[in-house]
Amino acid sequence: MRTGIFSKAVANIYFLSNKNFTDNLYFRGAIFKIMKNIRIDYHTGTGGSKLVAELLAEELKNNNINVEVNRIFRAQIDGISEISNIDYYILIFPVHSFCAPKPVYEWVEHLAGNRCKTALIGVSGGGNVLSNSASRHKTVKLLKKSNFNVILEEMIQMPNNWMGVPGKEKYIHILSKLPNKIDTISQAILSEKKQRKIVYWIDYLISALGEVEKKSTAKFGNRIQVLDTCTGCGYCAKNCCSSNIQIENKKPTFGNRCDMCLGCIYNCPQKALQPTYGAFQVDKKGYNLRLMCQDANLTAEFHPIIQNFTP
């Protein structure tokens, strides 16, 4: 008891006498803890989650944090990967059918968290609509099973890439909120804020139906048509997060593991991939997040990340 009071007194004196005390140093009872190392893993198709990961990493680095950023690929999942020497873990994913993509589940199942404090961030064209509120639920359960301590849940709205890309006025409005959202989340992480979301039973039901719907994505992937404009550059195969594309005879071939991230179609340099099954879900005008961000004048806020951004 006396030791606790004495320690707190010393702590208060230290805080008052050090004006340059960094923002990432916190007092917990009688123990000082410095957050030094953060790891960010993200899953992306058309770039929304990647952009969030890069912007968040830059903000944390500006607070003297060492940040490691990794993209999730199915091909990298092999054995158990232990999270060690990390003070905080961040997992970012796009919402697919009101859930996380299957590669995210597989990724988490092959991690060992060592009770690491964790933030789970969903990225969606719908943002915090009620039907998205359960989108993190299964991932939270898997993280807990893998011994992670999930203390923060967040959702970031990005321009939708499915069933119609929003018009210019709409996507500028959405992206204009991004700087403040990144700042809010980074401060929540630095302060180790605890913030879990309430989920209602109807949202669990919608998420469960979404899991059933995702089973049809294999048909979408293995029926993609390769046009004559394809040069066999291999961009689609290299960047397929589901490891579903192989290059054979200088042309892409598609397996049965597609998660319908739409990355290969929207990001093809030659626009040589065309959907046949469920083609109505892809916007013929395309999807270019870097150009959208430039229209929203985010280059001034986040240059050179936006200027050099590729999905």
Image (cartoon, helix red, strand yellow):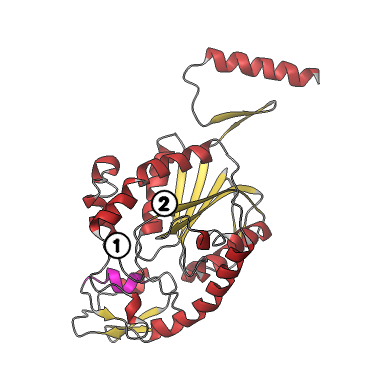
User: Secondary structure beneath disc 2?
Assistant: helix
Mark 1 and mark 2 in contact (Cβ < 8 Å)? Answer: no
Measuring from the top left, give residue 252's x and y in whole percent: 31, 82
The prevailing secondary structure element of the residues shown in magenta is helix
Quarter of the image with the N terminus is: top right
Q: Is residue 163 left or right of residue 295?
A: right
Residue most extreme to the left: 229
Of labels 2 and 1, earlier in sequence is 2
Q: Residue at x 51, y 32 (%)?
A: 24
Can residue 62 be seen? Answer: yes
In the image shown, does 196 or 270 lie closer to the viewer? 196
Q: Which mark is residue 166?
A: 1
Q: The disc labelled 1 sits on which kind of residue?
A: Pro
Q: The disc labelled 2 sits on which kind of residue?
A: Ala
Quarter of the image with the C terminus is: bottom left
Q: Residue at x 51, y 45 (%)?
A: 38
The answer to which image quadrant residue 73 occupies is bottom left
Q: Residue at x 37, y 82 (%)?
A: 278
* Mark-to-mark CA distance, 2 and 1: 22 Å
Nearest to viewer (mark 2 / mark 1): 1
Q: Residue at x 47, y 82 (%)?
A: 216
Above/below status of 33 relative to 115: above
Above/below status of 66 relative to 164: above
What residue does disc 2 label? 53
Does the segment drawn in magenta span residue 155? Answer: no
Provide the residue span drawn in magenta. 262-269
User: Secondary structure beneath disc 1?
Assistant: loop
Q: Which mark is residue 300?
A: none
Measuring from the top left, give residue 242's x and y in whole percent: 44, 73
